[in-house]
């Protein structure tokens, strides 16, 4: 059971890292696009940036919890089965 927890930790760490990289790239692309738009009013507002950052943070947390949740559900199913003698 200890090895499963360690494995779930490292899986979630990796998933969170990849999701953070993707979120940073998406935010950078949207910031660069806002500077090169032809309309002067097309710059990103503080509210839209905050919404994008919040969504990215929730995505990172969600990706981090997926492996842990998967292992916990698998363990609960395995331990809840009745043993035949």
Image (tube, helix red, strand yellow):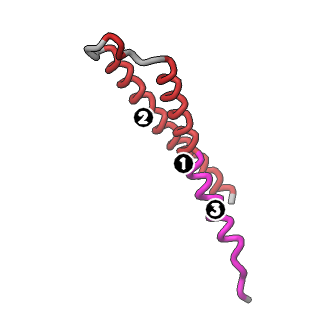
Counting from the top left corner in percent of width and height, residue 7 is at: 59, 52
As displayed, is residue 82 above or below residue 42? Answer: below
Counting from the top left corner in percent of width and height, residue 3 is at: 64, 56
As displayed, is residue 75 above or below residue 47? Answer: below
Residue under numbered circle 2: 22
Residue depth check, mark 1 versus mark 3: number of the one nearer the observer: 3
Horizontal side, residue 40 vs residue 82: left or right: left
Badge 3 density bin: few <14, some 14–19, many ≥20, Cα 10 Å? few
Badge 2 density bin: few <14, some 14–19, many ≥20, Cα 10 Å? some
The quadrant in which residue 30 appears is top left
Find numbered disc 1 in the image and state the secondary structure of the residue it sits on. helix
Disc 1 and disc 3: Cα gap in Å? 16 Å
Counting from the top left corner in percent of width and height, residue 85 is at: 74, 89
Residue depth check, mark 1 versus mark 2: number of the one nearer the observer: 2
Q: Which residues are magenta?
A: 65-84
Question: How many marks do you count on the picture?
Answer: 3
Disc 1 and disc 2: Cα gap in Å? 17 Å
Task: Give the prevailing secondary structure in the magenta stretch.
Answer: helix
Residue under numbered circle 3: 73
Counting from the top left corner in percent of width and height, residue 64 is at: 57, 44
Residue appearing at x 39%, y 30% in the figure:
26
User: Does the stretch in magenta take in 83?
Assistant: yes
Q: Nearer the viewer, residue 49 or 13?
A: 49
User: Does the stretch in magenta take in 68?
Assistant: yes
Badge 1 density bin: few <14, some 14–19, many ≥20, Cα 10 Å? some
Find numbered disc 2 in the image and state the secondary structure of the residue it sits on. helix
Residue appearing at x 63%, y 62% in the figure:
73
Residue appearing at x 59%, y 47% in the figure:
65
Residue under numbered circle 1: 11
As displayed, is residue 22 above or below residue 3? Answer: above
């Amino acid at each position: 059971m200890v090895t499963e927890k360690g494995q779930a930790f490292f899986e979630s760490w990796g998933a969170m890292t990849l999701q953070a990289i993707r979120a940073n790239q998406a935010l950078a692309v949207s910031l660069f696009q806002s500077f090169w738009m032809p309309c002067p009013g097309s710059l990103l507002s503080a509210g839209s940036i905050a919404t994008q950052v919040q969504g990215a943070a929730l995505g990172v947390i969600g990706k981090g919890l997926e492996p842990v949740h998967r292992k916990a559900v698998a363990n609960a199913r395995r331990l809840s089965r009745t043993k035949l003698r």
